[in-house]
Image (tube, rainbow, N blue to C red):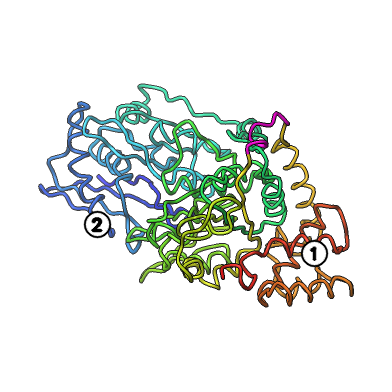
Amino acid sequence: MLVKTFGSAVYGIQAITITVEVNIASGTKYFIVGLPDVAVKESYFRIESALKNCGFRMPRQQVVVNMAPADIKKEGSSYDLTIATGVLAASGQIEPETLDKFIIMGELSLDGSLQPIKGALPIAIQARKDGFKGFILPKQNAREAAIVNDLEVYGVESIKDVVGFFNGTSQLKPEIVNTREEFYDSLCNYDSDFSEVKGQENIKRALEIAAAGGHNVILIGPPGAGKTMLARRLPSILPPLSLYESLETTKIHSVAGKLAAADALVTIRPFRSPHHTISDVALVGGGSNPAPGEISLAHNGVLFLDELPEFKRSALEVMRQPLEERRVTISRAKFTVDYPSSFMLVASMNPCPCGYYNHPEKECICPPGMVQKYLSKISGPLLDRIDLHVEVTPVNFSELSSDRAAEKSELIRERVIRAREIQVERFGNRPDLHANAQMSPQMVRDQCKINAAGQTLLKKAMEKLGLSARAYDRILKVSRTIADLAGSEEIKLEHLAEAIHFRSLDREGWAG
């Protein structure tokens, strides 16, 4: 008897429906075809043990399993339940009438219970698009898939539940998630707040500007000055995720298997902080079975690189193109996958190996030339993509012990949202542009016009401070954001002066 069941394969953050055909005929062997990997081939042993331990039988005849389309590689153990259901139906242990209305996915344990799968959300989206009535999957992934409307999602704990459901001997309760309610209930629900930071008003101002314009930022300062603490609070002042951004971010985390069973949606902006020993592939994505890297997991959020000069040069260099294009493309001989990677880069570093160059109290013990050598670990092209260079100084005792209440993240976020609204209006005819940081050089010329006094100030600053040519566009972009925060249509002298202040690493002699 020939039976068809349906599963799904995930490529990038998109899914493709896979038809699993099971045919039982005379003979004794088990064959699985259709470009399966080792994990799919091993499913025979998991399925046989699971069926026996749940009181069902594995046919002692020739079983041929074909996974179509046959030219797409099938990877992972999530097809176990799809194949097992087909085997049971082909051997007469399950009524096959309604099998074609459901996508069925899940990894089987030897006792018949189910383990979670990756990519439940993209699979559910594709299932609805292809007109399936429902999606049967492990209980742990049910909430994640249930945010897709007009699709019945059934979370099951064992293969017994699936058999009972199709034979009509037991009922399954569909998982219900109110997507909008889930989204708005936990929006901007951050654990940390800017009000917890004592002093550092200059740094808070820099991060507010960065958030308002989507600018990349680097924090330079001695150990213990609060660089990491401030960076971790940056997501709390970014504009809230839109529902579209939330769904896109959730898809990436779903494909990577990073969603907890209790989570249906990612409702706060991601904050990723990889260790400096990270490999190139782990940072940008890829591998033999392509998976999203840290830059994609930080999509719509913040990627924080602590101690930037300690990262491998090659890892930092492969990040340059995704920073510009806001997506990463991974190409293999037979296929290409795209992962979105629109993130804000926040980096921190000590000014020198000992950490105390330019410190107000402690003396730097590094030998001559060491500061410049340490800084040169960061390439010019990467530094070129960072708009704000912020020097962080330690907080003194009087500020630390002060009872004065600091400004809450919520108030800063309101100003950031107002500035972003101005930018959305400015770029209304360009849906791919959302913030000032994304402007092209031509757009900088059009949108960042300055008067004669401003031109004079900028010229003097570049000559006196020894600013490099690449700093020119960056200063104009940042000054445009500062003007937006102030609600000004024109870029004024004070906006330009503040932007010039945030170009520390471009100054000649900074590290000399």
Q: Residue at x 19, y 28 (%)?
A: 53
Q: Residue furthest top?
A: 170
> Which quarter of the rendered picture does the C terminus lie within?
bottom right
| 198 relative position to 168: left or right | right
Q: Residue 504: where, in percent of width, then height?
A: 64, 64
Whichever of callouts 2 and 1 sits on the residue coming sooner in the sequence is: 2
* Residues packed near mark 1 inside 10 Å, few (<14), some (14 to 19) or many (20 plus): many
| 210 relative position to 173: left or right | right
Count of labels in the image: 2
Q: Residue 35: where, in percent of width, then height?
A: 28, 60
Residue depth check, mark 2 versus mark 1: number of the one nearer the observer = 1
- Residue 364's place in the image compared with 39, above or below, is below
Q: Residue 43: where, in percent of width, then height?
A: 23, 45
Q: Amino acid at mark 2?
A: Val
**Residue labelled with disc 2:** 33
Residue 93, image quadrant = top left
**Which residue is more in the foreground, 257 or 346?**
346
> Which quarter of the rendered picture does the N terminus lie within?
top left
Tell me, yes or no, if residue 204 can be seen here.
yes
Q: Residue at x 73, y 77 (%)?
A: 463
**The disc label shown at residue 394, or none:** none
Label 2's element?
Answer: strand
**Residue labelled with disc 1:** 496
Q: Residue furthest left?
A: 28
Q: Amino acid at mark 1?
A: Leu
**Which residue is more in the foreground, 248 or 454?**
454
